[in-house]
Amino acid sequence: MPEPRRDLHKDGSVKAVGQTEDGELTGYWEWFRRDGSKMRSGHFDRGEPVGEWITYDRTGTPHKITQRGPK
């Protein structure tokens, strides 16, 4: 069963939010800058990045979109 996970920057602000299963990243994840703006988002399948990955600028506008597949 997937378990929620939240990683923090050294200053205590949220760095990443997602889920793990059996110790591996799984499902949808988001990463944030120290100022709280979203930096990147994407999906994992058993620890491997898959599908659409989006990198955002500081205003939250998508800057780059890439497709990832399993290795």
Image: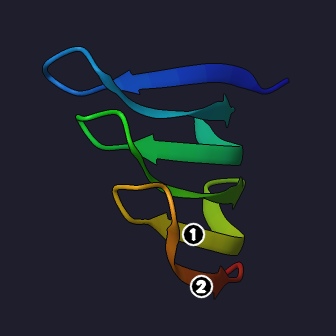
User: Are the residues tagged 2 and 1 within 8 Å (C-beta)?
Assistant: no
Quadrant in which the C terminus is drawn: bottom right
Q: Would residue 9 appear left or right of 4 to someone viewing this image?
A: left
Q: Would residue 46 appear left or right of 58 to someone viewing this image?
A: right
Q: Would residue 28 appear left or right of 63 to someone viewing this image?
A: right
User: Which residue does the image show at 71% across and 74% down from the upper left?
Assistant: 52
Residue 20 drawn at (x, y percent): 65, 33
Residue under label 1:
54
Q: Would residue 66 appear left or right of 44 to someone viewing this image?
A: left
**Which quadrant would residue 59 be assigned to in this image?**
bottom left
Residue 4 drawn at (x, y percent): 66, 20
Residue under label 2:
66
Element assignment for label 1 = strand
How far apart are the two marked residues, 2 and 1, measured between alpha carbons? 7 Å
Q: Residues within 10 Å of mark 1 (few under 14, many from 20)?
A: some
Element assignment for label 2 = strand
Q: Which residue is more in the foreground, 21 or 66?
A: 66
Q: Which residue is more in the foreground, 59 or 26?
A: 59
N-term-proximal mark, 2 vs 1: 1
Q: Which residue is more in the foreground, 35 or 43?
A: 35
Amino acid carrying mark 2 in the image: Thr
Residue 17 drawn at (x, y percent): 54, 31
Residue 70 drawn at (x, y percent): 71, 78
User: Which residue does the image show at 23% across and 35% down from the upper left?
Assistant: 34
Q: Residues within 10 Å of mark 2 (few under 14, many from 20)?
A: few
Q: Is residue 40 above or below residue 8?
A: below
Amino acid carrying mark 1 in the image: Ile
**Which quadrant would residue 30 be assigned to in this image?**
top right
